[in-house]
Image (cartoon, helix red, strand yellow):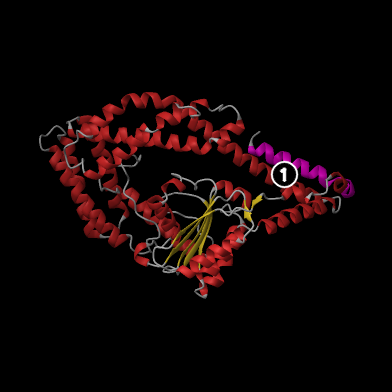
Amino acid sequence: MSTWSQVLSIGATALLIGGGVGAGIYAAIDAPDPAQYAIATTAEAPRLQLTNPDGLLTPADQAQLEQNLQRIDHPEVVRTIHILAFNNAENTRDNINDTIEEYFRAHYPDDILDKHGFRDGTLILAVDMAHRHHAIYAADDVADVLDLHSESSRVSSVIDAMVPGLQSNNVPAALFAGASLAMDTAGLQQERYESAVDDRIGGGIGAGVGSGVLAGVVGGTGVALRNRRRRLIEQARADYSLVTKEYADLAGRLDGIDVRANSLTSAFADAELRRQWGDVRDRFLQLHDTVSGAGGISSIPISDDAAAYRARKQLADAAETLTHTSHAEDNINRLFNIEQGDTTTRRTDLARLSRDITKARTSINDATLRQELVSLEERVRQLDADPASPTFLDDYLHLLSDYRIILDAVKDKEFSDVKDRHKLTTPAIYDKDYWYPTYIPFVALQSWHSTNVAAANSAASSSSGVNTTFSSGFTAAGGSGSF
C-alpha cells in the first residue's frame, strides 16, 4: 500500500471512530498489561571499556565510576559500555561526534560499522572537557530497546542529565548520571505502560474528534514504524541483488585492476593511492567467505522479510565494499588511460576540469583569483587542442598543481567566514567523486563551505539542540550536546 493510501486509510478510520460511541471504544481496548512493557535485564554487568587518554579521570574516579555502573540494573541488550573521557583540544575535534568516530576507527574498529551505527550491544558515553561537549550513542539494537534513536526525546534527556556534573567539573558524576538514565529500564517501562494507559483512556473520551484524532495518531505511528522497517528490508534486498549479481564478475577483473593500479608511473601514482587501493582490494578479497561461505550471503532466504531485516547490516557492508571496489576500478582505469595516451579519456577529463574551473570563476568574489582562473581555462583549451601531445601528461599535471594552489587561496579568502565545523576530506580512490591524488575540486570545496554555513546557522538558532552530525557522513543512534 502506498504512503498516501495509508494516510487516507488512517484518516478514514479516524473519522469512523470519531463518529462512534466513546464508551464502546474504551471497552474494546484491552487494559494494558505491565508485563507487556518489561525490558529484559541481567545481573551480569556488561563489559566496560574506559578510554582516558588525557588522564581526565583519576584512578580513584575510574574505580568509583566502575563500581557505580555495576549497581545499575543492566538491560540485557547492552553488552559493552564505552566511556570516553577527553581533555586535550589538540587531539580532539571541535565536533565531539567526529572525535568519537575517529577514535573508534583508530582504536576499536570492530565496534564501529562503515556508514551507520556501532556493533550490536554497544552503548557509548563521551565527554570532551576541552571543547565542553558530551554525547550518548548506541548501537541500533540498544537504541530500539532503550529508545535512544536520534529523534527520541530520551537522547536529549540523557544529554541534559549530564550537564550539572560537567558544569561543576564532576565528570564521574556526569557520566554516571547519563549512563543510569540511559539504562533506566524501570523508568522506561513505567513510561511506556503509563503512555498505553493514557492512550486507552483517551480512546474512550467523547464520541467525536478526540477519538478520531487519537486513532489518527496511533495509526500514523504504526505506519511510520512499518514504513521504516519496510525501507530497511527493501534496501537489504537491493544490497543482496547487487552483491550476488556483481561479485563474481568483479572478482574476475580484480587481478587486472591490481596490475593497472601498480603500473601507474606518473605523479598520479603516489603512495597514498596505492595504500587506498590495497585497502579496498583486501576488503574485497575478504568477501569470498562472506558471500559464498557457510552461512554466507548466498544462503540468506532473502524473500523472507525477517531474514532480510536480520541480515541488513551484513548486506550493507558487503554492498559498500563491492561499490568501493567498482569505483576504484573506474578511477584506476581512467588514470591508466590518461597515462597511456588515450585521447578520448584525456578530453573527457579536460572537459570535467574545465567545468569545475568555470564554476569556481563564476562563484568567487576575488578579482585576482578570478583572473588566474581565466588563465587556467585558456591552458585547458590548449591541452584539449592536442591531447596526443608528447608533453600532455607533464603539462596536465602542472595545470592541476597550479589549480590546487589557487583553490587553497579560494578556501582561505572566500570560505573562511565561518568556523570549520566539518572536516574537509580528500576523496579516496574508491570514492565516486575521486579526481586525482590530494586534489579536491571546487564543487566539493563549495559544498563543504555550504555545510559549514548551515551548521553555523543551526548552532546560532539553537545552542541547546542535540547534534547528530558527523562530518564524514557517518550516522548513528544518539547525539551530543554542549555545556
Foreground pick, 38 / 276: 38
Q: Main secondary structure of the magenta part?
A: helix
Please identify the residue farthest to the left as the structure is shown. Answer: 390
Q: Which of the image's four quarters has the N terminus?
A: top right
Q: Is residue 202 above or below residue 296?
A: below
The reply to whether the magenta stretch includes residue 6 is: yes
Q: Which residues are magenta?
A: 3-24
Task: Please give the residue where the numbered disc 1 appears in the rendered image.
Answer: 219
Q: Callout 1, which amino acid?
A: Gly
Q: Position of residue 437 (x, y in %)?
A: 25, 45
Q: Find numbered disc 1 in the image and state the secondary structure of the residue it sits on.
A: helix
Which residue is painted at 22% across and 50% down in the image? 403
Residue 345 can be seen, yes or no: no
Foreground pick, 12 / 128: 128
The reply to whether the magenta stretch includes residue 26 is: no
Q: Position of residue 270 (x, y in %)?
A: 21, 43
Q: Is residue 281 above or below residue 378?
A: above
Q: Position of residue 291 (x, y in %)?
A: 45, 28
